[in-house]
Image (cartoon, rainbow, N blue to C red):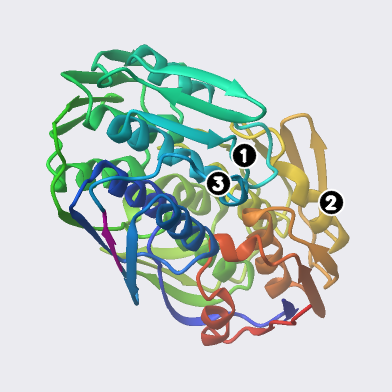
């Protein structure tokens, strides 16, 4: 992407369906036999298309029309996931729980994804073992099977992992008896998954204190659910407006989903108004104040918005710090921002950001999905021309980002390599 920066963004942008919500609710289709799952507000993304391809390989018939996707599930599914697809995306691990619960066995190569640090699926496997699965890992492939059905029981997650919570909730849906999972992730995506499980007939009761109670059923039924708005995409456009000192209204979002980021923006002195399903950002005559940020599991500050926040704070007046407590290799973007004139120093798990008056355009590389977003919004605010390479990462999570930015007045152009 070639960006000519220095243009304040103006206009309205609508939030897409959430990638991180769509992927697990798509995997719910694997709990069905001879039934259909219909999902609305599904974004058109690289990762979504990879998951569709994976589900089709496992035997699901998928039909997409605009943002609606219908999954027509046959009476029998295949249980071996191909390495070529699984290695593309970490979320491929989400087929593990539902396939094992439905078919009694599964073979899954260890998944790939963004290079932002170690993200093992140990918690997924530990929970499935406690439910009666026998698991063996050979040559990088997880082989799991269960005699009869998985057994419901009380589980405790050592860390509130989103992926492990989702996998175990789906596995528990067809298990024998009741499963209680404690210390679960509390992200809005978990609520969306719970709603999808309910729509196919699974009794799910979420407890506000970080627990979920699921009564296993014999057979899931057809259902329909809507994917929630993408809070990370919404944050990205909000920060792009702040960085360029623009006037932008970001619509179709749930403001309570982004409370942590809005609190930090308010602390920094950014000008904005929160409405029922929108956030409107206004220009400001002053540079942002520095702030201190620490990423945390929801409802804390999201790690997926951390690189974009770092880019924004690189233009603040003073020294900001961001502590990363979720993914250890999340700071790969820092050296790329420094190429644009930012002053960011990394000390173990902390980024020390000394604000500068302006950024300069440069050639930079997206090392992962959210790093790519950070470099794009930095390019929008920088003087001169910025070229962001390896945009393939960005297409994993941002639908038509070039078109949306152009609609807000940005000067961006895609260059085919």
Q: How far across and how far down the image is residue 232, in percent?
A: 48, 55
Label 1, residues with CA under 10 Å away: few <14, some 14-19, many ≥20: some
**Number of the front mark, 1 or 2:** 2
Q: Earlier in the sequence, mark 3 or mark 1?
A: 3
* Stretch in magenta: 69-73
Q: Secondary structure at mark 1?
A: strand
Quadrant of the frame with the C terminus:
bottom right
Q: Identify the residue under disc 2.
A: 335
Q: Secondary structure at mark 2?
A: helix
Q: Is residue 322 above or below residue 254?
A: above
Between the residue at mark 2 and the residue at mark 3, the CA separation in whole angstroms equals 35 Å
Q: Is residue 142 left or right of residue 172?
A: right
Between the residue at mark 1 and the residue at mark 2, the CA separation in whole angstroms equals 20 Å
Magenta span: helix, strand or loop, mainly? strand
Q: Identify the residue under disc 3.
A: 82
Q: Nearer the viewer, residue 251 or 206?
A: 206
Residue 292 numbered mark, or none: 1
């Amino acid at each position: 992407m070639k960006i000519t920066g220095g243009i304040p963004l103006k206009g309205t942008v609508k939030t897409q369906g959430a990638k991180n919500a769509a992927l697990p609710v798509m995997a719910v289709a694997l709990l069905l036999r001879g039934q259909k799952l219909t999902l609305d507000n599904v974004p058109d993304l690289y990762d979504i298309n990879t998951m569709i391809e994976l589900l089709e390989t496992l035997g699901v018939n998928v039909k997409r029309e605009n943002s609606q996707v219908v999954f027509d599930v046959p009476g029998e599914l295949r249980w071996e996931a191909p390495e070529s697809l699984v290695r593309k995306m970490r979320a491929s691990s989400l087929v593990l729980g539902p396939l094992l619960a439905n078919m009694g066995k599964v073979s899954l190569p260890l998944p790939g994804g963004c290079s932002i640090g170690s993200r093992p699926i140990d918690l997924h496997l530990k929970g499935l073992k406690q439910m009666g699965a026998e698991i063996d890992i050979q040559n990088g492939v997880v082989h799991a099977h269960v005699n009869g059905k998985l057994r419901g029981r009380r589980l405790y997650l050592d860390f509130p992992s989103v992926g492990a919570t989702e996998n175990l909730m789906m596995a528990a849906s067809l298990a024998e008896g009741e499963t209680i999972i404690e210390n679960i992730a509390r992200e809005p995506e978990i609520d969306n998954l719970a709603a999808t499980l309910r729509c196919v007939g699974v009794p799910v009761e979420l407890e506000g204190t970080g627990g979920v109670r699921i009564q296993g059923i014999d057979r899931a039924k057809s259902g329909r659910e809507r994917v929630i708005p993408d809070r990370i995409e919404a944050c990205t456009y909000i920060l792009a407006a702040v960085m360029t000192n623009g006037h932008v209204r970001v619509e179709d979002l749930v403001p309570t989903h982004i409370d942590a980021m809005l609190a930090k923006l308010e602390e920094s002195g950014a000008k904005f108004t929160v409405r029922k399903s929108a956030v409107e950002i206004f220009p400001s005559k002053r540079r942002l104040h520095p702030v201190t940020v620490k990423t945390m599991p929801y409802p804390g500050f999201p790690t997926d918005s951390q690189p974009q926040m770092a880019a924004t704070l690189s233009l603040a007046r003073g020294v900001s710090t961001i502590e990363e407590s979720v993914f250890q290799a999340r700071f790969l973007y820092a050296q790329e921002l420094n190429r644009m004139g930012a002053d960011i120093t990394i000390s173990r798990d902390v980024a020390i950001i000394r604000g500068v008056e302006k950024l300069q355009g440069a050639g930079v590389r997206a090392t992962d999905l959210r790093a790519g977003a950070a470099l794009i919004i930095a390019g929008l605010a920088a003087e001169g021309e910025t070229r962001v390479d390896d945009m393939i990462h960005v297409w994993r999570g941002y639908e038509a980002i070039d078109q949306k930015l152009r609609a807000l007045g940005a000067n961006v152009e895609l260059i085919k390599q």
